[in-house]
Amino acid sequence: MKISNEWVNNRENREGIKGWLNPSRYGWERISYWFQRLTGVFLLVYFIGHVYETSSLLRGENAWNAMLEITQTPGGHIFLILVIGTSTFHSTNGIRLIFTHGGKGLGNPGRPDYPYDAISLNYRQRSGIWVALILAAIAMLYGSAVLFSGK
């Protein structure tokens, strides 16, 4: 079996994880895709930890209070702010994706002429990604104001 030199010398598809995370190569749709996956994994880890924390109540009041002391530190507050931001982004971007997969907000399909710009990522889709990011930032600011207010 003969392999062409063009295929062997082509390094474009061999970038590994660096290539996946390259925003100039794939654009906002790929960044949104990775944020959706990363926030999903983060929220899964948080959910497992939250179940463990809540189950400490079964071991008595002292165990419950010891677990709460961990969350009532500046590091615990920062972690909760990250939970607020990731859950806001994940849910807002998920709603955008539900509409996208349902064909809403995509516009009319176009002929695939060179330079093959993705019609699926029109201004409505970009706006949805920015709305998700902005809402996550606002939620994180509000969460930090509540958690660090000292009340």
Image: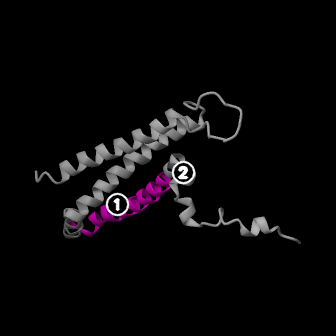
Callout 1: SS: helix
Q: Quadrant of residue 98?
A: top right
Which residue is at the far bottom?
Answer: 1
Identify the residue at image location x=67%, y=41%.
116
In the rendered image, residue 91, in percent from the top left (x then y), is placed at 43, 44
Real-space CA distance between mark 1 and mark 2, rounded to the nearest whole angstrom: 30 Å
Q: Which is more foreground, mark 1 or mark 2?
A: 2
Q: Which residue is at a point 54% across and 30% down the rendered structure image?
A: 105
Magenta segment range? 34-61
Pointer 1 or 2: first along the chain: 2
- Magenta span: predominant SS is helix
Q: Mark 1 packing: few (<14 Cα in 10 Å), some, or many (20+)?
A: few
Q: Nearer the viewer, residue 95 or 66?
A: 95
Q: Return the x and y of residue 23 as percentages of the image width and height.
A: 51, 54
Q: Residue at x 45, y 36 (%)?
A: 127
Residue 135 on the magenta segment: no
Q: Please state, as top left, top right, bottom left or bottom right, where the N terminus lies in the image.
A: bottom right
Expressed as whole percent of the image width and height from the top left, the position of residue 55 reads: 32, 64
Circle 2 SS class: helix
Q: Can you tell which mark lies on residue 30? A: 2
Q: Quadrant of residue 54?
A: bottom left
Residue 36 numbered mark, or none: none
Residue indicated by mark 1: 50
> Above or below — where is 16 with respect to 26?
below
Residue 141 rendering spot, x and y as whole percentages: 25, 47
Q: Amino acid at mark 1?
A: His
Q: Give the residue at x 56% y 30%.
A: 104
